[in-house]
């Protein structure tokens, strides 16, 4: 490769970075597979998982620790999680405006808030900016009364009970 060719050097560096990312992800998956095999061996020999087995517990803890280290260093997963969290926050802001006066929009907002909380608990896209605790919660209480569920008879089924 020629010394002065900066674009070739940049392309090579990018390809090497991708290769490192994929290798780390592959090794992380291989460690998970090994941990599953340890678990299967422990269950087959004693009926308890590897983490509870006296012979396999140390190996299980070591493999789990290495896998977590690799997972935490994987920039692709981290970047993807942050991008997902940012997109979700943008949608939440958009639906917050609509939910002030629309019950259906409020239901969509609740679904997005629940999804964000679930992803937060799983550690996806954690950062101060995407923290559920740093964004406004659900809008103020409804100005209109809640809609009631209407029971309707279904063809071929038993009649619906009357609401009390």
Image (tube, rainbow, N blue to C red):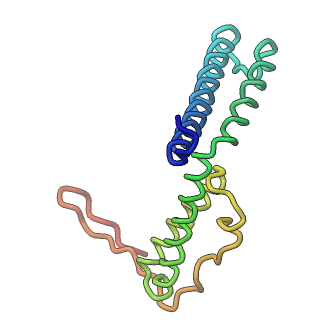
For the residue pair 119 and 2, the one nearer the viewer reads as 2
Question: In the rendered image, which quarter is residue 9 located in?
Answer: top right
Q: Residue furthest bottom?
A: 143
| Image location (x, y in percent) of residue 49 | 69, 21
In the displayed structure image, the side of residue 30 where residue 11 appears, left or right? left
In the displayed structure image, the side of residue 56 where residue 93 appears, left or right? left
| Image location (x, y in percent) of residue 66 | 73, 29
For the residue pair 150 and 24, the one nearer the viewer reads as 24
In the displayed structure image, the side of residue 16 where residue 99 appears, left or right? left
The relative height of residue 32 versus residue 95 in the rendered view (above or below) is above
The relative height of residue 28 versus residue 110 in the rendered view (above or below) is above
| Image location (x, y in percent) of residue 63 | 72, 24
The relative height of residue 20 versus residue 98 in the rendered view (above or below) is above
For the residue pair 10 and 143, the one nearer the viewer reads as 10
For the residue pair 78 and 21, the one nearer the viewer reads as 21
Q: What is the quadrant of the C terminus in the image?
A: bottom left
| Image location (x, y in percent) of residue 87 | 51, 65
Question: In the rendered image, which quarter is residue 34 located in?
Answer: top right
Q: Residue furthest left?
A: 155
Q: Residue furthest top?
A: 45
What residue sits 58% from the left and 46% below the top?
Answer: 77
What residue sits 48% from the left and 82% below the top?
Answer: 99
What residue sits 24% from the left and 66% below the top?
Answer: 153
The relative height of residue 82 versus residue 132 in the rendered view (above or below) is above
């Amino acid at each position: 490769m020629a010394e002065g060719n900066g674009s070739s050097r940049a392309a090579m560096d990018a390809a090497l970075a991708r290769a490192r990312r994929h290798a780390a992800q592959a090794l992380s998956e291989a460690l998970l597979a090994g941990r599953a095999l340890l678990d299967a061996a422990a269950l087959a020999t004693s009926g308890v998982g590897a983490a509870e087995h006296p012979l396999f517990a140390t190996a299980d803890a070591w493999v789990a620790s290495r896998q977590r280290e690799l997972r935490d260093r994987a920039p692709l997963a981290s970047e993807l999680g942050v991008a997902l969290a940012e997109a979700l926050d943008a949608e939440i802001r958009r639906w917050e405006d609509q939910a002030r006066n629309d019950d259906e929009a409020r239901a969509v907002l609740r679904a997005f808030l629940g999804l964000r909380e679930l992803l937060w608990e799983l550690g996806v896209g954690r950062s101060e900016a995407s923290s559920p605790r740093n964004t406004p919660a659900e809008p103020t209480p409804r100005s209109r009364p809640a809609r009631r569920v209407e029971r309707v008879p279904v063809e071929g089924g038993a009649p619906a009970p009357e609401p009390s």
